[in-house]
Image: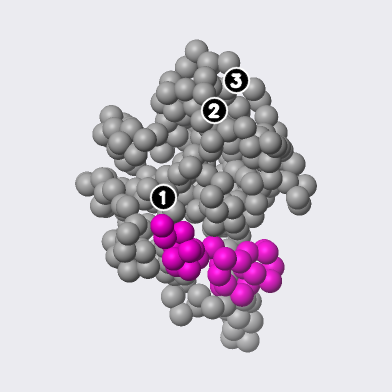
């Protein structure tokens, strides 16, 4: 009996570490398509982050000064099979944009072991943009999906006025609520354990859940050129997040796609999606 109790206590101690590790590790979606499919010339680019992680991506030169940085979400890549981000890049390029498509850290062909929910990723991207466009030649748009959308919002917060527009497709607003929801759904960890999970994630994995939260950020960004896109059947981000966004920023522009789930809008309704972007002047 003593041994069983000891094993049970050991399980209670180690299980949170296992759960956190599983949820923050990266994803290696293979890169199987290139912009050569668009008939475009492209450059393989790379960047080494402040903490020594090598990131990889593409630079596809356009015919204007406009440029777009496309940011995939967690478990995605610049090929973005779930979101269709690769085909969205083709749409932007056809409209004359210079297109920058990247694998965020711990994704695709980029290095790194863990994701940081935008906290480190946004600094990575700001550093990379300085390398790509050191004299500010281009007029930049940021277009991100889920974690990529949060990354874009963090970039806009850090460099207000540097970007013409942010398209934030399905960013979370209340990060703590998302974590509690997903811990219960994926690992049967009760919401009451969230403070412990947050502390372990911070102490042992370098995570900062407070900085990943978007509530204060949405207030700060209110009035900037941001288009929010959501799906009505998004189980990861139920309508609570969007009601909260409207409370935090009543003027927030939100477009809703009905009957589909998380980040499925472009793949499901590409023509409607791009019509909306065109109306936004993109």
Q: Which residue occupies the foreground of this view, 62 or 259?
A: 62
Given this view, does label 3 or label 2 mark the residue nearer the observer?
Answer: 2
Residue at disc 1, secondary structure: strand
Distance, label 3 to label 1, CA atoms, is 28 Å
Image coordinates for residue 264, horizontal then vertical, percent: 34, 41
Residue name at image x 47 percent, y 17 percent: 38
Instruction: Judge the density around disc 2: few (<14), some (14-19), many (≥20) Cα neighbours within 10 Å.
Output: few
Circles 3 and 2, Cβ within 8 Å, touching? The answer is no
User: Residue pushed farthest left?
Assistant: 259
Residue 247 bears which disc, if any? Answer: none
Residue 65 bears which disc, if any? Answer: 2
Residue at disc 2, secondary structure: loop
248 sits left or right of 202 in the view? left
Distance, label 3 to label 2, CA atoms, is 17 Å
Q: Which residue occupies the foreground of this view, 162 or 78?
A: 162
Q: How many numbered discs? A: 3
| Mark 1 lies on residue | 226
Looking at marks 2 and 1 on the same chain, the residue that comes earlier in the sequence is marked by 2
173 sits left or right of 140 in the view? left
Does the stretch in magenta take in 201? yes
Q: In which quarter of the image is the N terminus?
A: bottom right
């Amino acid at each position: 009996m003593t041994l069983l109790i000891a094993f049970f206590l050991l399980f209670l101690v180690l299980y949170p570490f296992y759960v956190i590790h599983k949820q923050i590790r990266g994803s290696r979606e293979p890169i199987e398509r290139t912009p050569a499919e668009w008939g475009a010339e492209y450059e393989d680019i790379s960047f080494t982050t402040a903490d020594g992680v090598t990131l990889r991506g593409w630079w596809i030169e356009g015919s204007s000064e406009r440029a777009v940085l496309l940011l995939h979400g967690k478990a995605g890549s610049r090929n973005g099979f779930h979101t269709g981000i690769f085909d969205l890049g083709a749409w932007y390029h056809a409209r004359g944009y210079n297109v920058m498509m990247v694998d965020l850290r711990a994704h695709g062909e980029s290095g790194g072991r863990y994701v940081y929910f935008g906290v480190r990723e946004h600094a990575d991207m700001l550093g990379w943009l300085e390398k790509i466009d050191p004299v500010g030649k281009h007029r930049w748009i940021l277009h991100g999906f889920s974690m990529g959308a949060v990354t874009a919002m963090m970039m806009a917060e850090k460099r207000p006025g540097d970007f013409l527009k942010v398209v934030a497709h399905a960013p979370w607003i209340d990060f703590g609520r998302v974590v509690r929801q997903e811990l219960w759904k994926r690992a049967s960890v009760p919401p009451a354990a969230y403070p412990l999970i947050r502390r372990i994630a911070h102490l042992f994995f370098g995570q900062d859940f407070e900085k990943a939260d978007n509530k204060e950020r949405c207030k700060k960004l209110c009035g900037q050129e941001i288009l929010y896109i959501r799906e009505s059947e998004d189980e990861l981000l139920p309508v609570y997040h969007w009601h909260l966004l409207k409370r935090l920023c009543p003027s927030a522009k939100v477009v809703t796609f009905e009957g589909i789930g998380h980040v499925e809008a472009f793949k499901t309704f590409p023509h409607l999606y791009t019509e909306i972007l065109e109306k936004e002047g993109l």
